[in-house]
Image (tube, coloured by chain):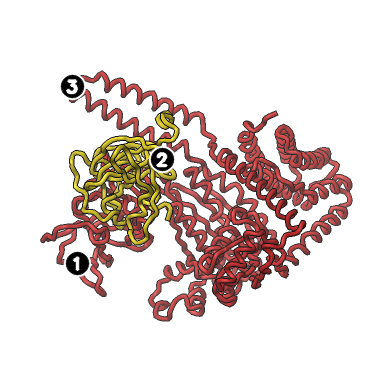
Amino acid sequence: MDVSQYLEMFIEESKEHLQSLNVTLLEMENTPDNKEYINQIFRVAHTLKGMAATMGFKKMTKLTHDMENVLSEIRNGEIAVSAELLDVLFQCLDALESYIDLIVNTASEGDEDNKPIIDRLDAILESKGKGSKATKDTKVVVKQVETPVIGDLKTERKHLMLPFNDYEKNAIIKSKEEGYITYGITIVIAETCVLKSARAFIIFRTFERLGQIIKSYPSVQDIEDEKFESDFSVFIISKDAEATFMKELGSISEVEEILIDEMNVEGEVKDFVNKEDIKEEINSDIQKVQDEKTKAKQQVIKPKANRTVRVDIERLDNLMNLVSELIIVKNGLETVENNNQNMNEQIEYLERITTNLHDAVMKVRMVPIERVFNRFPRLIRDLSRKLNKNMELHMSGEETELDRTVIDEIGDPLVHLIRNSGDHGLETPKERQKSNKPEMGKVYLDAYQDGNNVVIEVRDDGRGIDIQGVKKKALNKGTITKNQADAMTDKDIIDLLFRPSFSTVDKISDVSGRGVGLDVVKTKIEALGGDIEVKTELGKGSTFIIRLPLTLAIIQALMVNIADEKYAIPLNTIQNIEDVKIADIKYIQNQEVINLRGHVIPIVHLDGMLGVIKEEEDKESITVVIVNKGDKKAGFIVDGLIGQQEIVIKTLGKFLINSRLIAGATILGDGEVALILDVNSLV
Amino acid sequence: MENIQTKSNNATQFIVVKFDREQYGINIQHVQNIVRMMRITRVPNAPDDIKGVVNLRGEIVPVMSVRKKFGLDNDEYTNSTRIIIVKVEGSAIGFVVDEVLEVIEIEETHIEKIVSDSSDENSKYVYAVGKVDDELVTLLNIEALIGVDE
């Protein structure tokens, strides 16, 4: 039976079931005696089993089947709910989630049969809850399997074991003739690292700067998809010495170990062929073909599974209504006689409909942020266990809606911030007692809409950021000079934490409490058109405030004239518009500034920056648009204001991708193209 | 477009355009559209040969001056000036040409590939010369012009 057409439905529904499983498990942990939760979990497991069996996912079926067996015993009162049992159930949930992820990406459930979990389930079933010893034994076994693997990774020079194919061998030999050296490098990333793939990306960028990567294991694609444990190996051709690599790589944070060797391949290999090689070659070719097949499959299926959005039927009805109104207007316009009065009426009507239509279409794309927030209670639970700290999560505003594209991307940065809060922000119970705080640390996650933005706050009542400590560290590391340090405000110093070069090893986080990979978080949020700021009070806690635009496609903008060219400035960046007398422009360090109600604001000559040819003219006053970039302000000199307008953002296309200063283009009512200024790069 | 192609198996169709006194051929397969000159919005800090962007039915399309690329005089817009929109690798780009003359068909055997001369910067934008009757048409290498093969 061809079930592929049901795949989307399966994925969507499984995700919902797993979500409810997650929530129920967490609640069950708090009130283990509540039978209702057991029943609910049982039902979910049962449904999942049925669904997986229908779709032919055998391993998933097996796992849910065993879960169901255990749960049914609990329901019958044969097995008591214990912490261990909950642990196993959580593991089951994780395993199921990874099955679903695999199915989303590859349309197959993969090879992992999660034997240890099934064994534990079976052991629980056998012992029927009486001898919890049996489960403990299995636990030990599981652990034994895991630990040596980790131990091996740390010492293993994995790159020495990877085979080369002929093409790679030739490349190495050739480059050696030309004086390049080939290195095999294995990098171990800290296990605490949250965004492993992003970290790997930064490492790859460093490699690309130093030389040419000829091979990596796992493949670059897999690394990007975070399909690796904590280490990966690369082969790189470069002229630089080993020490350069060690230095460059060593400065990247969260890199735990760097193993590097010079690689040599015998020159005659390329002519010397024996059966073994042929076999290997054929095998590797087959592997390649298969890889490509799965890749092709991924490419076909992946978007398919991702693109669906569940839409409230009410919203669709609303959309339909608006479209029918649009048709009515069209008919109205066709029959309208050359009567201005009538025409204007129809146009006003049309205007109202298009505005509503825009709203309605936007709403279809909106998803409640709940989808992302839902996984955090679990995260806090796991963190709390791992770190031996008492902590609880308070969430509000889960119903706040955001564009689907933003929702998909915001999860990782939030995980990172919450982990940061739990790990570095909150103190240990002892410390908390000492400073007269309740033992239970609190992490707050609040989302709310603020004008055209959605704000997400991650707040903790922990120790806060030690600004002096960060300053000292930055000085020691040479990130800033003494003079700079003296001139810096607290805010500037906190901003240092977001710098990519400000790597934080464990020692620093003891002092500062923050900084692990915040650069990655910031980059991601800025890529979404948002920004992030931090407020902190020593001893009281810190707040990370993320601001995200509601939508990425349509914005309010101020249209301005610069000479005879028209430009759009996004309205959310504008603070106000001032008329400034030429005489009021002062010079500070060769920079033109104005003093506006006590604020010194630098002036930007847009005509010069944009290369607009303009005739010199003598004016008494100029129009200045004051814009914000975070806390920084700047005044843009414009020649005329056209007015506020709703504009649709379009890209300039790939031939003009490097246009700095310009964020995109939009089409005006008369069909003319106007460019949108990129305020970030102009301030 | 395919049924035009099948007219003759070994012939390719070209749109003949004019710059200065010379005639150039552009493979019709690349061409999406030919539009009259319209208002071009200048893009700051764009490469020299990009004149700016135009609105092609809601799509923003960059426009390149081939004259500038070839080091000829500046474009002079007349009533016969046209923008030829081509699509390469999924992205559209426009070329300003002085005049569009005709569509011609050139037999495979009448197309003579030319080896690009490294001393002449412009020669890499040309890949062959086609003979039609007694006239010669220089055939443009669109990929090289917009720099996707570099």
- Work out whether A496 lies above or below B131: below
Q: Residues within 10 Å of mark 3 (few under 14, many from 20)?
A: few
The image shows residue A450 at horizontal and vertical percentages of: 41, 48
Foreground: disc 2 or disc 1: 2
Q: Is residue A468 left or right of residue A189?
A: left
Which residue is pictured at 35% across the width and 26% down the height?
Answer: A326
Quadrant the N terminus of chain A occupies: top right
Which residue is pictured at 70% across the width and 43% down the height?
Answer: A109
Disc 3 is attached to a residue of which chain?
A
The image shows residue A654 at horizontal and vertical percentages of: 40, 50
SS of the residue under disc 1: loop
Residue with the most extreme front position: B134
Q: CA distance from mark 3 to mark 2?
A: 61 Å
Q: Residues within 10 Å of mark 2 (few under 14, many from 20)?
A: few
- Work out whether A350 lies above or below B120: above
Chain in yellow in the render: B
The amino acid marked with disc number 2 is Thr
The residue pinned by badge 2 equals: B109
Q: CA distance from mark 2 to mark 1?
A: 71 Å
SS of the residue under disc 2: helix
- Colour chain A appears in: red
- Work out whether A573 lies above or below B80: below
Foreground: disc 3 or disc 2: 2
SS of the residue under disc 3: loop
The residue pinned by badge 3 equals: A338
Which residue is pictured at 17% across the width and 57% down the height?
Answer: A614
Q: Is residue A45 left or right of residue A455?
A: right
Which residue is pictured at 37% across the width and 36% down the height?
Answer: B13
Quadrant the C terminus of chain A occupies: bottom left
